[in-house]
Image: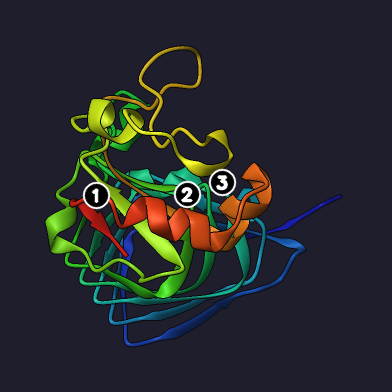
Amino acid sequence: MLYDKVFFEDREIEDERLDLTDAGSLYFLGANVTFRRCTLVLKVPAKNLIFDEGTRFIDCTFEVKQELKNHQQWVFASLKGCRFKGRLSGCDFGHWPSYSERAGHGSIEDCDFSEARLDGCRIMGSDPATLRFPKWPCFTLLDPIGRARELNGVEWPGGFRPILVEGPYREPPATRAITFYAPALARRRKTTEEELRAAVERFDGIVY
């Protein structure tokens, strides 16, 4: 398939609504571009949405119209004062230089996910205290690496292990927070939302 290529580079864009919704287009939000107070409507797969180092979003709103899956390139971008709406799964945000050199430019602060549905989404190398996370049925583990012994020290329903610190699928040391969506997690682990809620309520340091 031949894609149309749409480039946003080397400029500042203010107070605009940008519809990134054409499945036949590749959207390059590239080098040295700043989006300020923009609304970005996203309705394409992650592979159609390409960030580069130096991309800045300030006081923007992201309206995710179809589930955005496994989009790690958020860590290439600087996000400040932004709001997210819609469904995101397997996405990473923040500062993660060990992921790639370009990810050394990423950051996230003062952003609001309270109107989003996050599942398996991580905050990397940035302070989650400046962020607003979605409430139940989402729940967010804060400082999961530092609290791995505590979190894994009790039995969770469905054999769920909240944080892996050993083996090939272990969480990177830069992981500062992880958010799960209880209904999807319950389906994957063949358990119930109620059992997950009961497990979550045993701990401090979980936002729900």
- The residue beneath circle 3 is 70
- The residue beneath circle 2 is 91
Tell me which numbered mark, 3 or 2, is placed earlier along the sequence: 3
Across and down, in percent, residue 166 comes to 40, 14
Under circle 2, the secondary element is loop
Residue located at (62% from left, 64% from top): 67
- The residue beneath circle 1 is 203
Do the CB atoms of the residues marked 3 and 2 lie less than 8 Å apart? yes
Across and down, in percent, residue 196 comes to 47, 54
Residues packed near mark 3 inside 10 Å, few (<14), some (14 to 19) or many (20 plus): some
- Could you tell whether 202 is left or right of 180 in the image? left
Do the CB atoms of the residues marked 1 and 3 lie less than 8 Å apart? no
Under circle 3, the secondary element is loop
Above-or-below relation of 30 to 143: below
Which amino acid type is marked by label 1? Phe
Tell me which numbered mark, 1 or 2, is placed earlier along the sequence: 2
Residue located at (52% from left, 43% from top): 157
> Mark 1 or mark 2: which is in front?
1
Above-or-below relation of 50 to 10: above
Residues packed near mark 1 inside 10 Å, few (<14), some (14 to 19) or many (20 plus): few
Across and down, in percent, residue 203 comes to 24, 49
Above-or-below relation of 41 to 184: below
Distance between mark 1 and mark 3 Cα atoms = 28 Å
Which amino acid type is marked by label 2? Cys
Distance between mark 1 and mark 2 Cα atoms = 25 Å
